Image (cartoon, grey):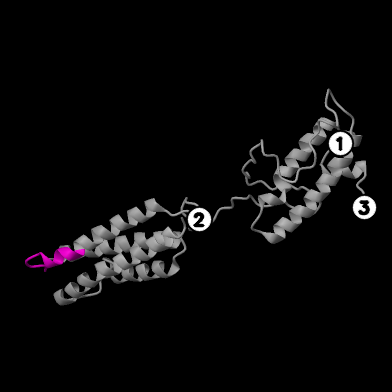
Amino acid sequence: MRVTSDEGYAVLELSPGAPLSEVKQAYRELAKIWHPDLYPYDEALRARCEKTMQRINEAYEVLRREAPKSGPSSAAQAPSPASRPPSTEKVPAWDGRIRVREAGAEPPPPANAWKPFRRHVQDDRSDSAGLAQTFAAFTAAAAAMVSLFVIDNPTSTGYYLVVRTLVSGASLYGGYFALSRGYWESAAALAVLALFLNPIVPIPMSVEDWKLFNAACPVLLLFFWFHMYDRESSRG
């Protein structure tokens, strides 16, 4: 069904009889919000935007021929309905306020919606800085554990408290990195390790138990790091 001029003004949220310059400006503003190419990963939202944008294009086609001219503007100078949003203007970030664009409808959510538990790194890029920081934390923890084999009489309570603190802290940091990048299995295993070695409610171990644990744990941390390194490398 063909859009009438009165309907066109309503679709573009303009008062009847608005000049062509206002019609063009309203069209550009609505295209920044409703163009389906802004939402490529949500099929339902994209379908809704396609329907709304089609209505906006129809309204604009009618009004750019029928709207009164203001100044030197002419229909020949008016932009054609775009197949893509205007490329010369930056799409503004959503400010959190809800604006009603049509009866019973709310504006689409912003293209870059906030995601919890995500570092400020694109999901399709490797996080080299995060990997390096995790490696440094694991290295400090491994050095503390290996020192048990060079200490003459490792019976000091303070020594084991330092080891527990370093290893549990490094495990928690590595778990945070793994969680932020979506490596749930590594995050869960590192969280269990941090809980096992926590200095607040320590699990009693003999010197022999400590030696066995301190020999195996650095290898385990290295395994987790290389696992995350391999996953990050695949991101490019």
Residue 115: quadrant of the picture: bottom right
Q: Picture coordinates of residue 79 (x, y %)?
A: 79, 36
Q: Picture coordinates of residue 37 (x, y %)?
A: 69, 50
* Mark 3: few/some/many CA within 10 Å (<14, 14-19, 20+): few
Kind of residue at disc 1? Arg
Kind of residue at disc 2? Asp
Q: In the figure, is residue 198 to the left or right of 122?
A: left
CB-based contact (under 8 Å), mark 2 and mark 3? no
Kind of residue at disc 3? Met
Q: CA distance from mark 2 to mark 3?
A: 44 Å
Please name whichever residue, 35 or 14, is drawn nearer the observer in this view of the structure: 35
Residue 149 falls within the magenta-colored stretch = yes
Q: Which range of residues does the magenta coloring cover? A: 145-155
- The residue where tag 3 is placed is 1
The answer to whether any part of residue 233 appears in the image is yes
- The residue where tag 2 is placed is 124
Residue 9 falls within the magenta-colored stretch = no
Q: Is residue 76 above or below residue 104?
A: above
Element under disc 1: helix
- Please tell me which residue is depicted at 20% across the width and 60% down the height of the picture: 143
Q: CA distance from mark 2 to mark 1?
A: 42 Å
Q: Is residue 28 above or below residue 206?
A: above
The disc label shown at residue 64, or none: 1
* Mark 1: few/some/many CA within 10 Å (<14, 14-19, 20+): many
- Please tell me which residue is depicted at 87% across the width and 43% down the height of the picture: 8
- Please tell me which residue is depicted at 19% across the width and 75% down the height of the picture: 212
**Earlier residue among tags 1 and 3:** 3
Element under disc 3: loop
The disc label shown at residue 153, or none: none
Q: Picture coordinates of residue 173 (x, y %)?
A: 35, 59
Element under disc 2: loop
